Image: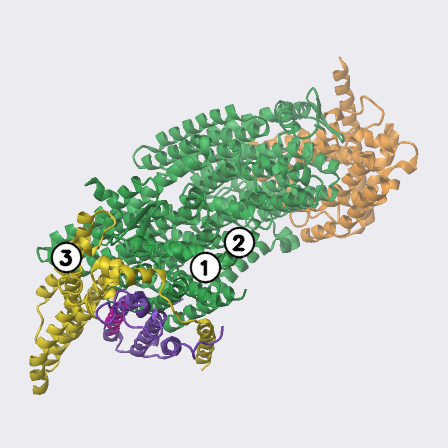
Chain colours: A green, B orange, C purple, D yellow
């Protein structure tokens, strides 16, 4: 009995016997034949697993009692095992999923079994003609199954498939005939051994024919219109089997025959794979039909796998499975799940997919699948893509890397746009049978499980540092439904505290400073989240995940660890942003730019050929320049630098109010950290380079335009968002200075930014919580209702503006000194201008919200909730200490930077001295304090009694305004400035990116136009595809 | 009475001198303007009378705590600015508390009073206040540009931000003043000063006809007294700063008076001769020629003076 | 090399015929709009391929690989043609039959839905 | 027109490729190594005089099993597409026309003969040209004639299905017998039965049995296909 499970041949025997018997057994009753059917599928999966587990060396299975070239043999090695396990498990679950569909038709069940036989055969057989037969079995079974839906869509799609299949089989058979003619054998191994014989016109034609046939099975661009129609037209369960099963068979068949292909022409295969990946995803952009979109994605993913295959078909097993297997597995798991979900939702247009959100379980699997396809960690695609891109980088395949990354971005855009529609929700009821739900769930779990394994195996000995926080976060997300909000918050905070303890134990210097920024800042801010009486179940898990990933960023030594954490951070923050009420559109922009940023990072790391961050230091300068540019672009996008800032306002504004604080105060520092990392390691190349100089200008421009745009916002959170952009601009410039003082400035500004942006966002969160609007002109006079919030906001703007005696001045002092010391004089002047403009929005913020005339409807507004006040008080306290005793912390920054370059900042007492000037923060604070108190006492003495008056009691030509609240001057406050400078801030960047979007959609539509829906056109493309391939191969 | 005590006393003396001087200058301005317009104008002691009257008023109303504190911030800002500037070159005691920080501190401390005042005035709830403040801020960011360029030009020229050292570098004859070594920067700075002083043509902030006296509309009695005191001290502080940066500083009070008076005349003369700009015109004005001149000054310092 | 038509006429003629059939079939597949004609064209192509397969197995002047009284085991090696292509053709024909049957069933159903046999009427899915 | 032009152009290019093949084609003068083995040892090893049969049934037996599967799933596909289902609307009754007397009487004579010929072909597959597929096809042509003669008579689906089902299963079973009796690597080996005397009907091990099964399966399957198509 054990032997049964260890012989792969039994997969065929079981399936065929069952399929043949079905007709007879069906006479005994439906139950009997269903049992036979599912029993057979189970046994097949079991045999595959059993055979794979007992595999000690590749197994050759002879038939008919003769050795290979005489008879047909099968092979079951590690590669075959991997792919057959996938296929047979998918078949079992796919069969279960199709229960409804198959239960009424015994013929359909037989077809399904034979389909699986066909795929297994395509994978295992080592005989060329036998391969042809298995291809035919697979195709014919698929034609039959598609025909089960007898509507016009399925019929016309199926017919186009048959036409294409007819052409494919003619090509393949002709190829087989010519191969036999040249080699005198049909055994693939022998043919490969004799492949030199095939290097003549007939042989090459034979190879071309065979490859065309197999490639067409993989639906390459542009000869794939029929494939798209099949995905769209056929039943979702069948489409899933085609996408993950039939394609697998074709892929493996191709893999087997690839050695025949002249090695010097392997680039053709790569090119086909790449073009397919790129164009499918481009065309997917314009797609609105869910299944066709999945079709585009399927085709694209297989293109990527094909590309990887062309590179790694001769690679050792681990590498092959790591890259080709990983990419395949990713596609396999995600695409099956998505097609199945599509079958449950039963909506063609993605706009109607809101209905899915009624099932949490399905939505979660949907998210997992989408993220896996996009290539976010920890899903299998991430690791495979990383390795792949790294290998491409070491081979300097810049063009391929670019195409892959851009294509992936397209895919991400259309998948996430779809996700947005899912989140939109719907009134309609979602009907879902258990038989359909279970396979989806199992695939979700398998994906999660494999991802967990991959974290463990890919990150090496350090993996538990990354694994446990993720596990903790996931658990926190899932228990979210069952335990109260406050308890979850408590768990999250204790998790963060432990993490902060752990991280701080393990890092030092600059990394320690960043760790403290991320984790302490995060911890204090987390207190604020208590103010919500009810948070979404996943919020705290994601929050923890985001902070943990930032901690991981600080800990990471290798580029992979860094990138992993970076992507986890992107993922967590995206989900946090999108949980805002109207955040869907903004979140899409945010994630698109974030993924763009990640793409730059990936390209940068790939071209650096370095596995460790430390290795970046060893790059020759020409390479370092390119690598630095790419990486810096990645970080700049995340910091919202000028030109790539358009995601900033949306993401900040539309996230939930307490989350915005995290994004602005903490998350934006990730970019700073990244910039620091590369600046440190590539210091020697970058110092005094044009690159640093340009970066400096970019920073200053970011500061200027950020400030200017902030001044014109009516939306309070958008104002703060642009303000953050502007402030990050200074930091960019400061890092770009590449001097001791510059870096101290950057750190100082970052820490200060955490302090005042936290204050502002929390204060504003309280205000929004109380008045339920973000439009500033709808507020006013809230100082009397929310005094602490006002003080917090006021202190924040003083600290932000740089007015002494609070912390802001130190930053300005350091910055101007550093800029001038470096000789960046014009930049310094522009920075002056920028910080002048900053006053505009800062005044506007405080005035419009807290001062001026109050609105009658706000007369009962109370102070912000205590939970929001507590962190504000903490931050205010920190700010006061930091302002009074700057040496306490600035010296630490100076020392940390001093590790990399000689210090130019000296201290005597509380006086800091540079080559240009000096500053004694302690003294300034005291002098100002004393003068303030004296003047105040004078005023108090002058007035014995001050009469408090009502709000509207103002000097207004002796009259009281009719509707006093309208006298609150807040709307379009800086009209004159807009008149004078508005031209500077026309939304050019937005227009540019809109243009990019528009153009890619137009292109998408244009290319998709080749899919006319006419089967003959598709056939013609197949013919042209062959001619092209023939031309390319024959060209030499 | 340690050195600190002595320093405080000298600082107080400075304050009184500058306060009186500032008030006199204000009166002088008013009188000049009146004469230009064919009126007799106020007597020179009028501001003193006003300020005493305002302080003497007993009744006061308050719109709230920030309203109350606004003038306090304002006066603190004015006094503080003066305190951080070394007034008399070479005098240990009249250098006040300039050891606390350099030119950048002074430049940024100027905003302290303005910001506090703006917030206080806003709480008054009068619509003219925010309108005035908005205009003031807009104007400020415009004139900051040539001013900043001039300051940076100085920093390049003297390679320091320390005011004392800047003055020291200008000793040794009239030709070593910045005014003569880098006239472009000085012109830019003087143009910026016109905006700073808010006399015509840059008086839209206070615009008596449209938004009677602008931001301080709601302030009265002792509040107004404090604002007036500040105006005097602050005006003096700015003039001293300009003198120090561009005109070689002063080694004693007569020289100080002479030089600052001369600087002040620029504003007065221009103010008497020109009509008012609208806010957007102001912005455009400062971002054009003064900025160009400032950039020339900066480049001149960068490539010629060093 | 050159054409071997003179020396070995039969195999080459059959081979050329096979290729011609493929081309003719393809022309039909790509230009005829009537679905039935397209299916016929496909079978022409398939037949062409089979013909080629046969021609490859053929050796001039030999006979079928059946070892009975006509061909004895001893001289079989020089008397019979290659049995493998024959076996392959057999299989290929059966597969062609299956595909054609399925195609025709599709056509029957498609005709029921649209009352048309023009392939251009079945482009419901596109782009 | 432009479309046709491009199609013609690409076919001409394709013809060029083919021409290259033809130009380089040297007809075989020798058997390939594998074929040599079959010719030299086929009869001894498998006991079949028809070497094509030896190749089809045993040497490349897996192909043939696949072929049977192909036919099976084609028939299933046809059935799936054409057979009425529960919720299908019964369209219309066409008016009946009886076939001519000539057809009816010829059919009466010919059908049994055709069936017999079919059986003969698959029974002698290992000795003479022919075999299971050919025999099955001949049987199906008999069925076709039957349909022409009696268009409104329905075949018994149940019996056909059972026959088809059993023969398919039997084929797999015989394949397994090879493994169980002769050991691993002997799937679809005909030699678990004695090879018998070369050239007689009961020789060549299990080949006749396999061909009987195939013949039955193909015959029934094709008949079912015809039936399905006729009913539609």
Q: Earlier in the sequence, mark 1 or mark 2?
A: 1
Question: Is label 1 on the same chain as label 3?
Answer: no
Left or right of residue B68: residue A684? right
Q: Nearer the viewer, residue A818 or A402?
A: A402
Which chain contains the residue that carries disc 3?
A: D
Q: Badge 3: few (under 14), some or many (20 or more) residues near its Cα, within 10 Å?
A: some
Q: Quadrant of residue A489?
A: top left
Which is nearer the eye, B99 or A120?
A120
Crowding at mark 1 (Cα within 10 Å: few <14, some 14-19, many 20+):
many
Task: Report in which chain the residue with disc 2 lies.
Answer: A
Question: Which residue shows up at 68% across the image and 32% down it?
Answer: A740
> Which chain does the numbered disc 1 sit on?
A
What residue is shown with label 3? D170
Mark 2 secondary-structure assignment:
helix
User: Mark 1 and mark 3: span between their CA atoms?
Assistant: 45 Å
Q: Quadrant of residue B221?
A: top right
In front of the other: label 1 or label 3?
A: 3
Coordinates of residue B109 in the picture (x, y in percent): 69, 33
Residues shaded magenta:
C94-107
Q: Nearer the viewer, residue D98 or B31?
A: D98
Q: On screen, A702 above or below A766?
A: below
Q: Which mark is residue A1015?
A: none
């Amino acid at each position: 009995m054990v032997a049964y499970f260890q012989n792969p041949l039994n997969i065929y025997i079981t399936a065929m016997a069952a399929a043949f018997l079905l007709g007879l057994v069906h006479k005994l009753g439906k139950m009997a034949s269903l049992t036979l059917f599912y029993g057979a599928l189970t046994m097949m999966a079991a045999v595959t697993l059993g055979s794979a587990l007992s595999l000690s060396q590749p197994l050759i299975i002879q038939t008919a009692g003769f050795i290979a070239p005489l008879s047909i043999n099968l092979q079951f090695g590690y590669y075959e095992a991997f792919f057959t396990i996938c296929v047979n498990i998918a078949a079992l679950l796919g069969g279960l999923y199709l229960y409804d569909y198959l239960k009424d038709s015994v013929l359909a069940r037989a077809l399904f079994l034979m389909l699986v036989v066909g795929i297994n055969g395509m994978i295992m057989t080592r005989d060329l003609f036998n391969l042809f037969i298995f291809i035919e079995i697979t195709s014919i079974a698929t034609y039959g199954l598609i025909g089960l839906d007898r509507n016009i869509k399925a019929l016309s799609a199926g017919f186009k498939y048959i036409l294409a299949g007819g052409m494919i089989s003619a090509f393949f058979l002709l190829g087989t005939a010519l191969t036999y003619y040249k080699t005198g054998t049909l055994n693939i191994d022998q043919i490969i051994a004799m492949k030199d014989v095939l290097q003549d016109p007939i042989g090459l034609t034979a190879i071309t024919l065979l490859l065309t046939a197999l490639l067409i099975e993989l639906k390459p661009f542009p000869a794939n219109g029929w494939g798209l129609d099949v995905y769209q037209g056929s039943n979702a369960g069948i489409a899933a089997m085609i996408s993950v099963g039939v394609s697998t068979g074709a892929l493996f068949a191709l893999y087997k025959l690839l050695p025949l292909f002249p090695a010097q022409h392997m680039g053709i295969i790569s090119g086909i794979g790449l073009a397919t990946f790129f164009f499918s995803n481009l065309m997917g952009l314009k797609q609105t039909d869910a299944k066709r979109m999945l079709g585009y994605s399927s085709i694209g993913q297989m293109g990527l796998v094909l590309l990887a295959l062309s590179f790694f078909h001769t690679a050792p097993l681990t590498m092959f499975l790591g890259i080709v297997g990983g990419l395949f597995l990713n596609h396999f798991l995600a695409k099956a799940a998505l097609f199945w979900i599509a079958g449950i939702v039963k909506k063609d247009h993605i706009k109607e997919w809101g209905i899915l959100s009624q099932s949490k379980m399905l939505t979660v699997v949907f998210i997992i699948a989408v993220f896996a396809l996009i290539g976010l960690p920890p899903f299998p695609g991430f690791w495979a893509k990383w390795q792949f891109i790294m290998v491409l980088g070491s081979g300097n395949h810049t063009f391929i890397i670019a195409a892959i990354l851009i294509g992936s971005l397209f895919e991400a855009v259309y998948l996430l746009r779809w996700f947005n529609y899912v989140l939109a929700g719907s009134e309609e009821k979602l009907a879902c049978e258990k038989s359909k739900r279970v396979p989806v769930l199992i695939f979700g779990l398998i994906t999660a499980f494999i991802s967990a394994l991959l974290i463990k195996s890919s990150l090496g000995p350090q993996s538990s540092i990354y694994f446990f926080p993720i596990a903790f976060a996931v658990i926190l997300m899932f228990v979210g439904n069952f335990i109260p909000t406050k308890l979850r918050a408590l768990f999250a905070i204790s998790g963060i505290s432990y993490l902060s303890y752990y991280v701080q134990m393990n890092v030092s210097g600059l990394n320690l400073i960043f760790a403290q920024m991320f984790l302490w800042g995060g911890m204090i801010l987390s207190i604020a989240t208590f103010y919500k009486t009810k948070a979404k179940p996943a919020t705290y898990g994601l929050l923890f995940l985001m902070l943990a990933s930032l901690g991981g960023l600080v800990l990471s030594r290798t580029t992979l660890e860094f990138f992993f954490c970076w992507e986890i951070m992107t993922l967590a923050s995206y989900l946090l942003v999108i949980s805002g009420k109207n955040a869907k559109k903004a979140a899409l922009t945010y994630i698109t730019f974030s993924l763009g940023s990640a793409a730059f990072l990936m390209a940068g790391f790939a071209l650096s050929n370095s596995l460790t961050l430390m290795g970046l230091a060893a790059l020759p300068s020409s390479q370092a320049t390119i690598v630095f540019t790419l990486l810096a672009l990645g970080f700049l996008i995340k910091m919202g630098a000028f030109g790539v800032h358009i995601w900033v306002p949306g993401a900040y504004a539309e996230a939930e109010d307490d989350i915005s604080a995290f994004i602005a105060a903490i998350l934006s520092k990730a970019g700073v950290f990244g910039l620091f990392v590369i600046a440190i390691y590539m210091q020697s190349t970058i110092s005094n380079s044009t690159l640093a100089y340009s970066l400096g200008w970019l920073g200053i421009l970011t500061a200027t335009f950020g400030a200017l745009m902030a001044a014109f916002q009516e939306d309070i959170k958008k104002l703060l968002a642009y303000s953050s952009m502007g402030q990050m601009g200074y930091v960019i410039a400061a890092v770009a200075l590449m001097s001791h003082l510059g870096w101290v400035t950057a750190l100082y500004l970052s820490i200060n930014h955490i302090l005042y942006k936290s204050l502002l966002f929390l204060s504003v969160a309280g205000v929004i919580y109380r008045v339920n609007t973000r439009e500033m002109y709808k507020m006013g006079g809230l100082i009397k209702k929310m005094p602490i919030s006002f003080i917090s906001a006021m202190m924040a703007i003083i600290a932000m503006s740089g007015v002494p005696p609070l912390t802001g001045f130190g930053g300005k002092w350091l910055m101007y000194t550093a800029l001038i010391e470096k000789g960046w004089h014009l930049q310094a002047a522009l920075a002056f201008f920028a910080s002048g403009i900053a006053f505009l929005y800062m005044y506007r913020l405080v005035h419009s919200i807290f001062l001026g005339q109050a609105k009658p409807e706000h007369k009962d507004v109370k102070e912000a909730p205590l939970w929001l006040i507590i962190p504000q008080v903490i931050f205010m306290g920190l700010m006061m200490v930091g302002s009074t005793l700057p040496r306490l912390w600035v010296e630490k920054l100076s020392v940390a930077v001093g590790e990399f370059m000689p210090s130019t900042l000296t201290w005597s007492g509380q006086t800091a001295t540079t080559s240009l000037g000096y500053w004694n923060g302690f003294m300034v604070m005291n002098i100002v304090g004393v003068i303030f108190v004296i003047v105040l006492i004078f005023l108090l003495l002058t007035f014995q009694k001050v009469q408090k008056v009502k709000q509207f009691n103002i000097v207004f030509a002796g009259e009281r305004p009719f509707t006093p609240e309208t006298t609150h001057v807040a709307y379009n406050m800086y009209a004159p400035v807009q008149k004078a400078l508005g031209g500077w801030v026309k939304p050019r960047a937005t227009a540019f990116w809109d243009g990019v979007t528009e153009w890619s959609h137009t292109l998408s539509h244009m290319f998709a136009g080749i899919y006319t829906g006419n089967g003959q056109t598709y056939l013609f493309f197949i013919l042209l595809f062959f001619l092209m391939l023939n031309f390319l191969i024959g060209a030499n | 009475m340690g050195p600190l005590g002595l320093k405080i006393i000298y600082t107080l003396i400075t304050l009184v001198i500058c306060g009186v001087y500032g008030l006199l200058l204000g009166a002088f301005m008013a009188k000049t303007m009146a004469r230009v317009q064919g009126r007799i104008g106020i007597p020179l002691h009028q501001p003193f009378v006003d300020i005493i009257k305002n302080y003497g008023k007993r009744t006061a109303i308050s719109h709230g705590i920030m309203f109350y504190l606004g003038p306090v911030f304002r006066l603190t800002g004015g006094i503080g600015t003066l305190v951080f500037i070394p007034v008399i070159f070479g005098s240990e005691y009249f250098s006040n508390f300039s050891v606390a920080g350099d030119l950048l501190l002074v430049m940024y401390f100027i905003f302290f009073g303005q910001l506090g005042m703006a917030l206080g005035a806003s709480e008054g709830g009068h619509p003219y206040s925010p309108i005035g403040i908005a205009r003031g801020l807009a104007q400020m960011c415009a004139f900051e540009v040539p001013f900043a360029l001039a300051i940076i030009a100085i920093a390049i020229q003297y390679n320091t931000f320390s005011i004392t050292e800047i003055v020291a570098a200008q000793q040794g004859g009239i030709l070593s003043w910045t005014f003569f070594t880098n006239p472009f920067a000085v012109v830019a700075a003087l143009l910026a000063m016109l905006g700073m002083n808010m006399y015509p043509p840059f008086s839209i902030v206070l615009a008596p006809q449209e938004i009677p006296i602008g931001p301080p509309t709601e302030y009265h009695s002792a509040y107004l007294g404090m604002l007036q005191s500040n105006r005097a001290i602050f005006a003096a502080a700015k003039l001293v700063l300009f003198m120090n940066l561009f005109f070689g500083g002063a080694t004693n009070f007569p020289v100080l008076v002479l030089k600052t008076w001369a600087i002040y005349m620029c504003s007065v003369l221009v103010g008497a001769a020109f009509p008012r700009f609208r806010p957007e015109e102001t912005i455009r004005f400062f971002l054009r020629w003064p900025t160009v001149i400032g950039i020339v000054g900066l480049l001149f310092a960068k490539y010629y003076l060093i | 090399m050159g054409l071997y038509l003179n020396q070995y006429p039969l195999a080459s003629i059959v081979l050329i015929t096979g290729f011609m059939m493929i081309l003719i079939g393809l022309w039909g597949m790509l230009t005829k709009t009537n679905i039935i004609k397209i299916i016929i064209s496909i079978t022409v192509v398939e037949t062409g391929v089979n013909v080629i397969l046969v021609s490859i197995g053929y050796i001039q002047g030999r006979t079928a690989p059946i070892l009975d009284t006509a061909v004895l085991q001893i001289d079989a090696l020089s008397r019979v043609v290659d049995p493998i292509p024959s076996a392959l053709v057999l299989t290929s024909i059966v597969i062609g039959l299956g595909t054609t049957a399925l195609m025709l069933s599709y056509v029957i159903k498609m005709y029921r839905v649209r009352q048309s046999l023009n392939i251009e009427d079945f482009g419901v899915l596109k782009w | 027109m432009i479309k046709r032009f491009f199609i013609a152009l690409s076919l001409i290019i394709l013809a060029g490729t083919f021409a290259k093949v033809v130009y380089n084609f040297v007809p075989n003068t020798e058997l390939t190594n594998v074929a040599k083995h079959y010719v030299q040892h086929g009869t001894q090893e498998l006991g079949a005089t028809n070497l094509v049969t030896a190749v089809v049934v045993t040497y490349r037996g897996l192909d043939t099993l696949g072929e049977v599967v192909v036919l099976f799933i084609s028939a299933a596909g046809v059935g799936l597409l054409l057979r009425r289902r529960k919720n299908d609307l019964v369209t219309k009754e066409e008016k009946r026309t009886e076939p001519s007397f000539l057809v009816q009487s010829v059919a009466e004579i010919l059908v049994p003969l055709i069936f017999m010929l079919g059986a003969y072909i698959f029974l002698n597959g290992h000795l003479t040209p022919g075999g299971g597929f050919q025999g099955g096809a001949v049987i199906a042509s008999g069925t076709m004639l039957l349909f022409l003669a009696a268009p409104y008579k329905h075949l018994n689906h149940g019996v056909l299905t059972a026959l088809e089902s059993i023969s398919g299963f039997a084929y797999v079973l015989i394949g397994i017998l090879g493994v169980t009796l002769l050991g691993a690597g002997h799937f679809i080996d005909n030699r678990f039965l004695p090879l018998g005397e070369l050239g007689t009907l009961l020789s060549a091990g299990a080949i006749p049995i396999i061909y009987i099964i195939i013949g039955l399966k193909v015959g029934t399957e094709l008949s079912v296909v015809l039936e399905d198509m006729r009913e539609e």
